[in-house]
């Protein structure tokens, strides 16, 4: 039971994050992170000068599953529009052959997994330091944390940076 405890909370946290995002329309900043993450991933560099304040790993996470959906052909090859942070993400979400919900789900799913790992890590560390009860409490608190439930289902850098 001790070895399975962190993974129980990982599944709980990921499910809660996924349920929180189910059917949600994109937030104002999701297209920014989806587009810039896809651009960084496609180009293989961190030359995203418009997002210097964001952790690049979080941008990679939000775009990790995008190759699994049918994206707008040539969207990533279009010249960068430095006047709009969201233009690339808007093209990927709204102009792709895949449904916008599918593009958003592909961007959000890796964040759900990261939230699950955060809850598992909290449970594992607490178990190692203070025993099974502490691990159960820490995993439960991490999985039921309002910020993780609220932001863990969105393709933003908030939950990824927290984890």
Image (cartoon, rainbow, N blue to C red):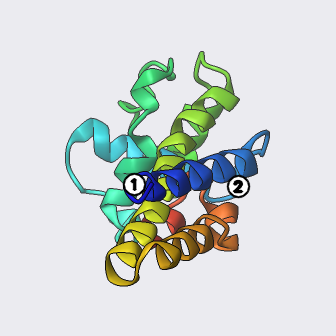
Which comes before the other along the chain, label 1 or label 2?
A: 2
Residue closest to the far left: 45
Q: Are marks 1 and 2 in contact (CB under 8 Å)?
A: no
Inspect this view and state whether residue 150 appears: yes
> Residue 85 placed where, x, y %?
52, 57
Badge 1 crowding class, 10 Å Cα cut-off, few under 14, some 14 to 19, many 20 or more, is many
Mark 1 to mark 2: distance in Å? 16 Å
- Residue placed most toward the observer, 10 or 82: 10
**At x 59% / y 58%, what residue is drawn?**
152
Above or below: residue 99 compared with residue 53: above
Q: Which residue is mark 2?
A: 27
Which quarter of the image is occupied by the N terminus? bottom left
Q: Nearer the viewer, residue 149 or 86?
A: 149
Q: Residue at x 61, y 37 (%)?
A: 104
Q: Residue at x 45, y 64 (%)?
A: 118
Numbered label attached to residue 59: 1
The C terminus: image quadrant: bottom left
Secondary structure of the residue carrying tag 2 is loop
């Amino acid at each position: 039971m001790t070895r399975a405890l962190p993974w129980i909370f990982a599944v709980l946290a990921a499910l809660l994050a996924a349920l929180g995002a189910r059917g949600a329309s994109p937030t104002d900043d999701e297209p920014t992170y989806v587009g810039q993450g896809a651009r960084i991933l496609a180009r293989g560099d961190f030359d995203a000068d418009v997002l210097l304040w964001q952790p690049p790993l979080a941008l990679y996470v939000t775009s990790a599953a995008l190759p699994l959906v049918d994206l707008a052909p040539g969207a990533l090859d279009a010249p960068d529009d430095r006047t709009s942070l969201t233009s690339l993400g808007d093209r990927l979400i709204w102009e792709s052959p895949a449904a916008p919900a599918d593009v958003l789900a592909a961007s959000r799913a890796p964040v759900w997994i990261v939230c699950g790992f955060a809850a598992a890590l909290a449970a594992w560390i607490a178990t190692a330091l203070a025993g099974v009860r502490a691990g159960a409490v820490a995993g439960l608190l991490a999985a039921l944390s309002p910020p993780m439930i609220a932001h863990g289902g969105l393709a933003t850098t908030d939950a990824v940076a927290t984890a």
